[in-house]
Image: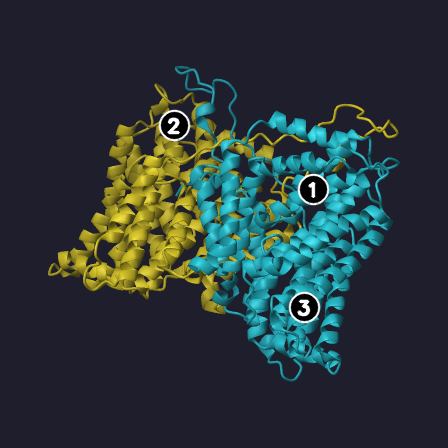
Chain colours: A cyan, B yellow
C-alpha cells in the first residue's frame, strides 16, 4: 500500500547529537494531539426539515397504481431533494445520507444503491473536471482571456464580447461553470474595472457593473451549449436516456449552436441598452491585455499540450462517435491519459480535485434514485397525473406551458442540479406523454436547465461569486435577469425551435 | 452548481478609493498566468516496459481453451500489473490507463469497464478511509497511543507491547496500514527514542531500532487480522467472492483472532531476543506519556463521538449481518453519516481525503479486470495449468507449497495490493482445484497477503516510512524479517490451522 497520511518527513529532522547519557537530553515530549478539532454539528432545525418531509411522505399511503417500494423510494428522494435545498450539510453529504437511507430502510439492496457510481455519464463529468484543472493550472485559460480582450477590448462592449468568446472556448472542457466565471473571467473583469477606477459603490456603473452582469448572463448561455459545459447537463442527458432519448455530445452541441451563438451576440447588446456602462471606450483594456500577453511570453510546453488535448477532445467528441464508435466518456479518459503521461497533470492533481469527487457522489446518488424511480414506475405515474392538467391543449401549447413553468420555478432553487433532479424527469415524461417530440423536448428542457440561471443572484454557483463582487445591486440584477430570461426564451424557443425543425428533430 | 475552483475571495480585497479619474489610477495589471507549470513528463523508459509486455502478450496467439477476448484482457491486465510494479506513474494513474486500454481496444464495453466503481466491497474501504480521518483529526489515535504507553511503557518491551495494542485497537477502523504505522505509531517511537538519546546511527540500537522494527512486524500482523485493516484485504475478499467464497467482516476477524493474538505476543519477544534494545528499562517513557495525557486533558466531545462511532462500527461489523442482515458497507456508511451529522468530519474532509479517491480508482479497475478475467474463463484456465504442477501430492502438501510460493514471492513486490492483484485469484483457484477447503484457503491466503510484508524494506506502504527513519540498516531488517516470516508461518499455519479446524472450516 502506498499510503502517506500525515507521515512526518524524517529526512528534514535536525541531526541529533549522539553519545549523550541515557537520561533525557533536551526536552523532547510525546506528541500532543494534532489540535483537537472542535465539533461543528449541523443545525438540527435544518436537518429536521428533510427528515420530517421524508417521514411524513413515507407514512402517507401509496396512491393507487404505485407500489409500496416505489412510494418509499419517492419519500427518500423528495427528502433528499429538500435536504439539498435546505442544506443542513453540503449537497454531497446530504445525498450520501439519502443513499444510506435507501439501504438502511431496506428499500434498495446495497448493490443497487451503489450502482450509480459506475454510470459512464457521471464519469464523463468527473474526468472533465480533472481535465479542466489542466486549463487553469497551465495558465491557458488566463491567456485565452487576455488574447480575446486584446483583440476585441477597445470598447466596453468589445471587452464583454471578448470575455464571452473566452467563456465559449473554455466551456466544452470546463464543466464547472463557476470555475469559468469565477476563476478565469471574474479576475479579468476586476483588473479592467479597477484600471478604469470602477469599484463597487459610486463608480460601479462606470465599467464593472456592465461587465459583471454580462459575464453572468453569458455564462448561463455557454453552459447551455455543451453537454460538458455544466455538470448538471449530463444529469439531464442521463435522465432523458432513462426515458429512451439518447443525447450524444455532438447532438447537444449541434442543436445548441445556432440559438447559442445568437444569444451570445444579442444578450450583451440587451444589457448594453438597459444597463449600460458609463464609459464606452476602453482603449487601455486592450493595450493592457496586449502587454500582459507580451509579459507572458510564448506559450509554454504545458500550455501547448493542454491546447492540443482540448482540440483532440473536441474533434473526438464531435466525430469520434460517428467514426470510431467512441463514446464521450472514452474520449475524456483518453484526454486525461494524455495529460497524465505528458506531465501536464500529476496523479496528485487528480486525487486532490475535490470538486470532481464531490460531483461523483451527489451525481451517482441522484442518478441512481432517478433511475430506480423510473424503473419502479413512479415517474411514469407522476407524469400521468401531470398530463391530466395539460391534456386537450395540443402538444405545442402543453410544451410551452411546461417549459415556462420549468423556467420560472427556478426562482425557488439555488442550484441548477437540484432543480434538474427535482423536476426534469417528470416534466420531460409529461411533455412526451402530451405528444411533444421526445428529442426536442429533452434538449429544450436541457437548455432551459442552464438559461434559467439568469433570474436571481442565488440561482447557481457563479451567481454568488459575481454578485458577491459587489458591482451590481439586487434590483438591477433581478430586473435585467428577468429581461434576459425573456430574450433567451424567445431566442431558444423561437430561432432554436426553427433550427431544431431544420435538423429534423420535430 | 456550487463550484469554487480558484475563486478569488473578493471580501478580502483592500477597499478601492472611489472617485478618481477615468484614467488608470494606481498600476493594476491584468492577471498574469498562475505560475505556468512546467511539464513533468513520465520516464518513457519506464512507460515502455508495461506497453512492451502488453503488446507482446496481445500478439501471442491465445492458448487453446482461451478465447481471444479473454486473452486480450489478460494482456492488458498483465501490462497493468507490470505498470503498477515498474511505476512510471502512481498506481491510480497506471490502472486508469489500463481501464482506458480496455475500452479503446474494444475488449470491454465502457459500461463493463466502469462496473468496478459500484462494487460495494470497494466502498467499504473508501468509506473506512473517511472514518479513519476522524480518528487522526480528533487526536483519538494519538491519545490511545499515549494511554497504552503510560500503562505498559515502564520497559522497552512494554513500550513495544503498548504500541502493538494501539495498532491493534485502531486496525479495524483505519484501513491505511501506513497511516497507523507512519502517522500514529512512528511519531511516538521517535519521541521516546529521542528522550533516551537514541538517534539513527551509533545510538540507534539503544531503543529506536528495536521499537521501529517491532512496530513494523506488528503492523503486518494487525493488518492481517481484520477485513478493514488493510485496503488490499477487501480486494482478496472480493476475488474470493468471485470464486464463490463469501468472506464476511466477522468471519475474517473470528478466523484471525487466535493466531493474531499469539503473533502479537510472540513476535515482539522474538525481536527482543534476536535484535534487542541496549536499554531495557524505560520508566521515563511511561511517565512522559502520563504527563502528556494530563496535558491533553479529558477527552473532547469530538473524540467521544469518534470513539462511540468506532464501538458502534465494531458491534455492527461483528453482529449486524447476523442480527439485521446489515452488510459491512452499510455499517460503514452509517458510521460516516454519524460523523458528518455530529460535525466530527466535514464534507470537505471527505472530498479532500485524496487517498480514499486514489484507492477507489485503482481498486475499481483491478477488481473489474479480475472479475472479467474470471468470467471470461482465464483464471480457471490458468489455475488448471498450475494445478498440473501440484497434482498427485495431496491437497495438504499442495496447499503448503502454494502458500510458501505465495509468501516468498513477495520479495518481488513493493505493494501488498499489487501482489494480491497479480497472484491471489489464480493461487486460490489452484488450491481449491487441488482439493483444499475453499474458505480456509481463501482466508489463509488473505492472511499471508499481509504477513509477507515482514520480508523487505520496500514490501508495503509502512516499510519505507519506518525504514526511512534510519534506525534499522538493511541487513538486520532482512534477517529479522525473514525470521519473523518463519515464526508467522508456523503460528498462522500451525495454531491458526488448528483454530480453523476448531471453527469447522476444514
Would you call the spot at circle 2 few (<14 residues within 10 Å), some (14-19), or many (20 or more)?
A: many
> Is B384 on the left or on the right of A172, as rendered?
left
Would you call the spot at circle 1 few (<14 residues within 10 Å), some (14-19), or many (20 or more)?
A: many
Task: Give the residue at x 66% y 40%.
Answer: A183
Task: Give the residue at x 58% y 29%.
Answer: B35
Instruction: For the residues labelled 3 and 2, say whether their Cβ atoms are less than 8 Å apart.
Output: no
Q: Tag on residue B119?
A: none
> Is A268 on the left or on the right of A172, as rendered?
right
Most extreme residue toward the bottom is A64
Disc 3 secondary structure class: helix
Give the percent coordinates (x, y) of residue A205: 85, 39
* Pointer 3 or 1: first along the chain: 3
Give the percent coordinates (x, y) of residue B160: 39, 36
The residue where tag 1 is placed is A163
Q: Tag on residue A54?
A: 3
Give the percent coordinates (x, y) of residue B200: 38, 23
Disc 2 secondary structure class: helix
Would you call the spot at circle 3 few (<14 residues within 10 Å), some (14-19), or many (20 or more)?
A: many
Give the percent coordinates (x, y) of residue A132: 56, 44
The residue where tag 2 is placed is B208
Number of callouts in the render? 3
Label 3 vs label 2, nearer the camera: 3
Can you say whether A498 is above or below B85 in the image? below
Distance of label 1 from label 2 (alpha carbons): 61 Å
The reply to the same-chain question for discs 1 and 2 is: no
Distance of label 3 from label 2 (alpha carbons): 57 Å
Q: Quadrant of residue B32?
A: top right
The reply to the same-chain question for discs 3 and 1 is: yes
Task: Give the residue at x 54% y 49%.
Answer: A128
Amino acid at each position: 500500500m502506498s499510503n502517506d497520511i500525515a507521515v512526518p518527513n524524517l529526512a528534514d529532522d535536525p541531526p541529533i547529537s549522539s553519545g549523550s547519557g541515557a537520561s533525557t537530553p533536551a526536552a523532547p515530549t510525546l506528541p500532543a494531539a494534532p489540535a483537537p478539532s472542535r465539533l461543528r454539528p449541523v443545525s438540527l432545525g435544518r436537518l429536521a426539515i428533510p427528515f420530517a418531509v421524508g417521514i411524513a411522505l413515507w407514512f402517507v399511503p401509496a396512491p393507487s397504481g404505485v407500489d409500496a417500494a416505489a412510494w418509499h423510494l419517492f419519500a427518500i428522494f423528495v427528502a433528499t431533494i429538500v435536504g439539498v435545498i435546505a442544506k443542513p450539510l453540503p449537497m454531497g453529504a446530504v445525498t450520501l445520507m439519502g443513499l444510506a437511507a435507501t439501504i438502511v430502510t431496506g428499500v434498495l439492496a446495497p448493490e443497487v444503491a451503489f450502482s450509480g457510481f459506475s454510470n459512464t455519464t457521471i464519469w464523463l463529468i468527473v474526468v472533465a473536471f480533472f481535465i479542466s484543472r489542466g486549463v487553469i493550472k497551465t495558465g491557458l485559460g488566463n491567456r485565452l482571456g487576455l488574447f480575446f480582450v486584446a483583440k476585441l477590448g477597445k470598447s466596453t462592449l468589445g471587452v464583454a464580447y471578448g470575455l464571452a468568446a473566452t467563456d465559449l472556448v473554455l466551456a466544452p472542457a470546463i464543466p464547472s461553470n463557476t470555475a469559468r466565471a469565477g476563476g478565469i473571467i471574474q479576475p479579468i473583469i476586476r483588473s479592467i474595472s479597477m484600471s478604469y477606477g470602477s469599484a463597487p459603490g459610486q463608480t460601479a456603473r462606470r465599467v464593472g457593473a456592465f461587465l459583471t452582469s454580462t459575464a453572468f448572463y453569458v455564462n448561463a448561455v455557454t453552459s447551455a451549449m455543451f453537454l460538458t459545459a455544466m455538470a448538471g447537463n449530463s444529469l439531464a442527458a442521463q435522465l432523458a436516456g432513462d426515458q429512451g432519448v439518447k443525447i450524444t455530445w455532438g447532438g447537444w452541441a449541434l442543436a445548441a449552436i445556432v440559438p447559442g451563438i445568437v444569444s451570445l451576440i444579442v444578450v450583451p447588446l440587451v444589457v448594453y441598452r438597459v444597463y449600460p456602462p458609463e464609459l464606452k471606450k476602453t482603449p487601455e483594456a486592450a493595450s493592457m491585455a496586449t502587454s500582459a500577453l507580451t509579459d507572458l511570453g510564448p506559450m509554454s510546453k504545458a500550455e501547448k499540450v493542454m491546447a492540443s488535448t482540448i482540440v483532440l477532445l473536441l474533434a473526438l467528441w464531435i466525430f469520434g462517435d460517428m467514426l470510431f464508435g467512441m463514446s464521450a466518456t472514452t474520449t475524456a479518459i483518453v484526454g486525461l491519459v494524455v495529460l497524465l503521461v505528458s506531465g501536464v497533470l500529476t496523479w496528485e492533481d487528480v486525487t486532490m480535485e475535490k470538486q470532481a469527487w464531490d460531483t461523483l457522489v451527489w451525481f451517482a446518488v441522484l442518478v441512481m434514485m432517478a433511475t430506480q424511480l423510473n424503473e419502479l414506475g413512479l415517474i411514469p405515474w407522476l407524469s400521468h397525473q401531470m398530463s391530466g392538467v395539460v391534456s386537450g391543449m395540443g402538444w405545442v401549447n402543453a410544451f410551452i406551458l411546461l417549459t415556462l413553468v420549468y423556467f420560472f420555478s427556478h426562482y425557488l432553487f439555488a442550484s441548477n442540479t437540484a432543480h434538474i433532479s427535482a423536476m426534469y424527469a417528470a416534466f420531460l415524461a409529461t411533455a412526451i406523454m402530451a405528444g411533444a417530440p421526445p428529442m426536442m423536448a429533452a434538449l429544450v428542457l436541457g437548455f432551459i436547465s442552464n438559461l434559467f440561471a439568469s433570474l436571481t443572484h442565488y440561482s447557481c454557483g457563479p451567481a454568488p461569486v459575481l454578485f458577491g463582487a459587489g458591482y451590481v445591486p439586487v434590483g438591477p440584477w433581478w430586473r435585467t435577469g428577468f429581461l434576459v430570461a425573456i430574450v433567451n426564451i424567445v431566442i431558444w424557443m423561437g430561432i432554436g425551435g426553427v433550427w431544431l425543425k431544420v435538423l429534423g428533430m420535430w
